[in-house]
Amino acid sequence: MSELAPYPFAALAQRMLREFDTRKTIFDLPQRKFVLGDAEHDLSVRFHGHTAATPFGPAAGPNTQLAQNIVLCWLAGGRVMELKTVQINDRLTLPRPCIDMQTLGYNVEWSQELTLEQSLEEYVKAAMLIRILEASGRLALAPGFGRTVFDMSVGYDLAGIRSERVQAFLRGMMDARPVVERLRRELPAELGALRDLDFQTRLSDTLTLSTFHGCPPDEIEAMVGHLMQEHRLSCVVKLNPTLLGATEARRLLHDTLGYRELRIPDSAFEKDTRWEQATAFLDRLGNKAQSLGLHLGVKLSNTLLVENHKTFFPPSERVMYLSGPPLHVLAMHLVRDLRRHFGDRFPVSFSAGIERANFPDAVALGLVPVTVCTDLLKAGGYWRGFGYFEELLKRMDAVGATTVDEFVLRAYGDTGATDLSAARLSNTEKYVEGLACDVRYHAASHQVGPRKINRRLEFFDCVTCNKCIPVCPNDANFSVSVPSTPELPLKMKRQIVNFADFCNDCGNCDVFCLEDGGPYILKPRLFVNRERWEQDAPRDAVLVEADTISARFDGVVLRVSEGDPPSDDPKVLALRALREALLDPQDVNHVGEFLRNALTTD
């Protein structure tokens, strides 16, 4: 199984700027899909006393694990970054594949795949890269549109949160000066002017507590209390859809929405927080936050535990986690229930089945932030964020709103009200009232998966539809120009390859590939570290070094270096062509940039 290997900060910075200058893309996201704001609309919102330029952001998950993922979310308009949840158990062995977006959204991954120390460094790197982009003058950002909030996420029990390594992570996020100063010095001479930038060192003073994966309900209050009391953190408590109770959750899922094949095990309700528990500890924690001069919010919701009735995941996985359209309905009913109980006392963060069409509705309910995971894993990937803002601005213009607050007041009819709290409550009732009847969320609308053409993927010359590139949350898949020759006749001008250091075998590219077999398995899987390449045996894989390219095919290793004698072996020809393409200085790509930067970085 491939394991994520964070990219050196200097190499990321060099590639990011050079790629934009030469191709007008950043980590394969084209400039035309950047969300940069405009002077006619103020989309800013308040989150725990901070101003964020938009209410949009990625949910804690695969899109906020590596530095380049977070930069891509920022370019897509995300300004409240819910970083991937960390925990003391950071040496998990996770099943692969782990993400299935064929119809709805399912996954079997949980928590970070990096160590706590690696996670801290990735988050610092991401903040520094964003600052570099802002200072570079390459982006035509609207005034104030760079304002970004980084929100930590931790779980899943009190002992883990109190452990020294998690405490060190929290301290590092609140005072990142040692990491910032070390990374600042790593910038090469050609980027020397950037070393003096005023990089943010207090990355975060807000935290979302995940209460999933067996989190003891009777410890939630103590965990939040500890985080507020000991670390002075404003907190969001992220709750689960099982809070609806077994009868209501199953009624909505089975009877109303028609997902009769989805079974929620009884254990999901037996072990999770009950409504009475949640409302009681939220009331007490709200009072505690107020006494400390902090903020408390609620997030709805985590994914929904269901029995694994499919064959995509390994047979060892008896359960999986549901996301996407049906979860939107369940979580919105919880928003309504929460607001009926507490009024507008607690700010609500939201993540469940958000996509282009319903993003403006979530904003109209005053939800901050509105976070996305499942939809960013579908065709287009981070490109999809651009459409969210197109839709939001269209809806705002239709009611004459130029700010988010004005939109909340007018979204469902201009009543002349000036009370935002009342508008949030009223809008919630209006939106949720007919939501379960909307066919967009019904099972009948989600029966057909991505198209396949019944052909097996090859090492070279697939249809090169490029679908696998944007659906990878880590930017692991990319294309290079491999010229056709008489010895190696190729049909396609560009070939798809996979950078193994960015790939964790999640399987999402296989879901959207027109052909069968999976790009992450059958396309050239590239390593730049010999030890990692050897550890990956016996899988077929390619090792790219400064002067040699090696490949393991069916356990046999071939090596190609510059100056080798001619060969008519098709595998040798393919390796030689691949080596030349990867190291072509005119073609900005992951491996070529990595090698060139590794050889020249100060």
Image: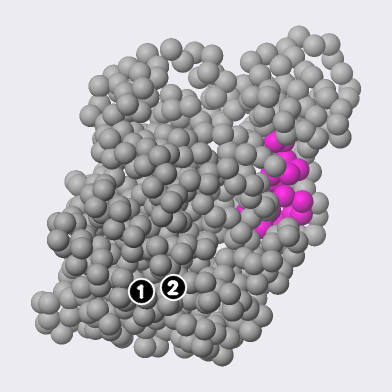
Q: How is the image coloured?
A: one colour
Q: Is residue 485 magenta?
A: no
Q: In the rendered image, is residue 480 in sight?
A: yes
Which of disc 1 and disc 2 is earlier in sequence? 2
| Residue at x-position 28% and y-position 35% | 175
| Chain part drawn in magenta | 508-525
Three-letter amino acid code of the residue under disc 2? Thr
Secondary structure of the residue carrying numbered label 1: helix
> Circles 2 and 1: CB distance less than 8 Å?
yes
> Is 307 above or below relative to 14?
below
Instruction: Relative to 517, say whether 502 is above or below.
Output: above
At x 40% / y 39%, what residue is drawn? 164
Determine the image quadrant of residue 578.
top right
Q: Position of residue 35 (x, y in %)?
A: 34, 50
Indicate left or right for 527 with 66 as reference: right
Q: Is residue 511 magenta?
A: yes
